[in-house]
Image: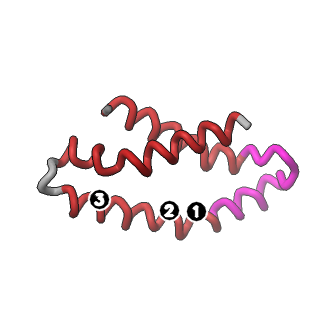
Amino acid sequence: MAFGIVFGLGYGAIFTQTSAFVAKFFGVDALPVFVGLYYTVSGFGYLFGPPIAGVLLEKTRSWGSPYIGLKLYCGVPMVIALIAIVAVK
């Protein structure tokens, strides 16, 4: 339950604050370029993330309820991103 809440807050913060984050660091004039670059780079995560998650599940053999490797793989970057976005805001 806690993981779902943290994941939801982190993803919501990343999704909604991307433009503000980019504008603050790179300026409004560069906003279209850097937002496009951000989503292009994050596309690689969407492309390679599921296979990596599958490998983690296979290696750790945690198909039960814990999924600890997968939770760490997904949760740690989201918490770091949430902290970074809150710090900028």
User: Which range of residues does the magenta coloring cover?
Assistant: 52-68
Where 47 falls versus 25 (above or below)? below
Outermost residue, top side:
87
Q: Name the residue under label 3.
A: 35
- Residue 22 location, x and y as percent? 26, 48
Residue depicted at 43% across the width and 61% down the height: 42
How many residues crowd mark 3 within 10 Å: few (<14), some (14–19), many (20+)? some
Identify the element where label 3 is drawn.
helix
Q: In this view, does 33 lie above or below 83?
A: below
Identity of the amino acid at label 1?
Gly
Q: Which mark is residue 45?
A: 2
Q: How crowded is mark 2: few (under 14 residues within 10 Å), some or many (20 or more)?
A: few
The residue to which callout 1 is attached is 49
Residue 60 in magenta stretch: yes
How far, Cα to Cα, is label 1 from label 3? 20 Å
Left or right relative to 9: residue 31: left
**How far across and down, in percent of the image, does residue 27 sit?**
15, 48
